[in-house]
Image: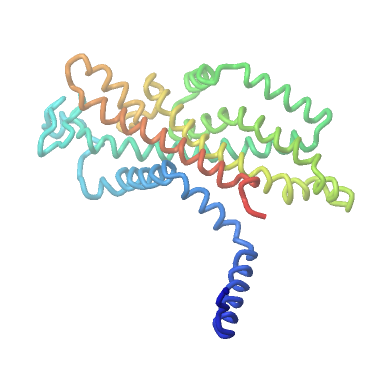
Amino acid sequence: MINEPPPSELHSLVTENLASTERSDEVVAMWRQRTRIFVHNKLAVTSVLFLIVVVLFCYVGPLLYHTNQTNQATALNVAFNAAPSLKHWLGTDSSGYDELGRIMFGGEYSLSLGMLAGLITIVVGTIYGMVSGFLGGIVDTLMMRLLDAFLSIPLLFLLITLISVFQRSTVFLIAIIGATGWFANGRIIRGDALLIKKLEYSEAATAMGGTKWHIIWRHVFPNSMSNIVTVATFSVADAILFLSTLGFLGLGIQAPQTDWGTMMQAGSVQQSNGFWWEIYPTALMFVLVIVAITYVGEALRDAFEVRLLER
């Protein structure tokens, strides 16, 4: 014979079951769901922590590790290509600059210019792609043919040509990388706009008298957020990569300013002399930053993917 619990205990069990049912039926906030999806990706969390350390290293590090990054060794009586020591933790380069301080100094320019150029890239690409895809018709055809013409030109050659013709400056590098890096992004966002405008809620909004710009802002833009965030993250990585490529080719920031690409180009010249500290630490930092940003971008794509969220 089964022993039934006393009425008091039975009432308690029923109350707990009802409470758990109510909790299970509660709607979890969207930002909590996205945070949970992102945190579940351990590589992405590690990458975020690493990027925070890199930002602190580049922007706060110079306040603790004092070096001169504006005057060369001839004015400071510092040895050229000095090996790592207690005075210079990563040695000095061929101009007499402290290498560790130079990595911090170059990182400030690489990260700042990459962020700003990436911001320009995603803003221009998002607007262009949404307008082209949503308006459709002859407007979409003309805009896409223009984009095809841009995409047919190798981006690196286009950057080299523009920088060779016009005078180099920090602002010009930001503008030119941002203005030439959005072509592929625009095509991706345009694909989202083509798909979303045919869905039921977009057609219903149109039938209710919603304007095209209202539908773009209220429906197309929010439901394209997954690709926009992903593309934005990768755009920052691409901008840092292009800036470093130009610096490696000698077309980057002008001295005494520097970036990681310019430092790697100078270090590669000295590698045959055995001065490993002039290239390997900078190259390692550069590669790890690009990989970390890539992992963060993939995790953000999953976090903003609507199909992974609870209804």
Q: Residue at horizontal 60%, vertical 81%?
A: 11
Q: Residue at x 49, y 30 (%)?
A: 238
Placement of 297 over or under 91, stated as above or below: below
Query: 46 and 24: which one is in front?
Result: 24
Quarter holding the N terminus? bottom right
Q: Position of residue 225 (x, y in %)?
A: 63, 45
Where residue 121 sits, quadrant-wise, is: top right
Q: Going by the image, does 147 lie left or right of 102? A: right
Q: Position of residue 54 (x, y in %)?
A: 34, 43
Front-lying residue, 218 or 181 = 218
How many numbered markers are drawn? 0
Residue at the limit of the structure toward the top, as seen here? 272
Task: Classify 209 as above or below 116.
Answer: below
Rendering quarter of residue 86:
top left
Which of the image's four quarters has the C terminus?
bottom right
Quadrant of the image occupied by residue 126: top right
- View extreme (front): residue: 1
Colouring style: rainbow
Q: Position of residue 106 (x, y in %)?
A: 33, 35
Residue 249, given in percent of the width and then of the height, sits at 39, 19
Q: Is residue 37 left or right of residue 79?
A: right
Report whether 301 appears left or right of 128. Answer: left
